[in-house]
Image: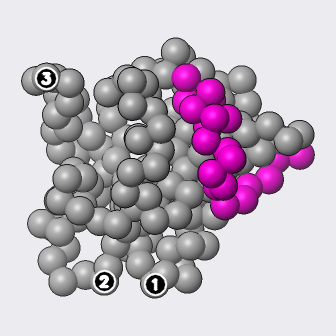
Amino acid sequence: MTTTRVRADADMDGCIEVLGHVYATDGYPVQGLDHARQFLTEGIEQAWVAVNNGKIIGHAAVSPATDSDVSVVLWRRLYPGKPSIAVLGRLFVDPEQRGSGAATYLLEAADSWSEHARCRLVLFALEKDQVAMKVYKRRGWTEYGTVPYHYGGGKEMAAVCFVNRI
């Protein structure tokens, strides 16, 4: 049975292992894995793990909204003065565990956090991540635009932005 819980420091090795599987399958994160621990910890306000039979199979995190995130910049441009937002990111599930409900459970944990924090969550998915976008749409997230995402020494890809509730 898959459950979610707040991520603990002791979970990091398991999270990095799963992120390695995701990168090998999907190329996420596009920046690579050289700084995986930093990717999963820097600027994080809250994080959760999905666990199945004692093994970490997924991860999600919420970060404060900053202008370094393209979904934040677009949201603020389109909806100035709207209530506060935070960023959902670092969401991934082990490719061998997809279909287990882990992504749904992680999104539910983040949605619950955002209700308690009285803020909306925004995120972006790169155009290559069609499966992730389908998950967000199935969970009721609303697409609010597409912007360029720049990474890795001049590379660019379209980033599709979503919000958990309007």
Element marked by disc 2: loop
> Which mark's residue is nearer the viewer, 3 or 1?
3
Provide residue 72's location: percent of width, then percent of height: 24, 61
Cα gap from disc 2 to disc 1, whole angstroms: 8 Å
Image mark count: 3
Q: List the single residue furthest toward the front.
A: 10
Residue 160 higher or lower than 7, as above or below: above
Residue ID for mark 2: 83
In front: label 3 or label 2: 3
- Determine whether 26 is above or below 114 in the image: above
Answer with left or right where residue 93 lies relative to residue 90: right
**Which residue corresponds to the image point at 15% horizontal and 77% vertical from the top-left?**
80
Residue 10 is a magenta residue: yes
Residue tagged 3: 153
Q: Which mark is residue 118?
A: 1
Highlighted range, magenta:
1-20
In the image, is residue 151 part of the stretch drawn in magenta? no
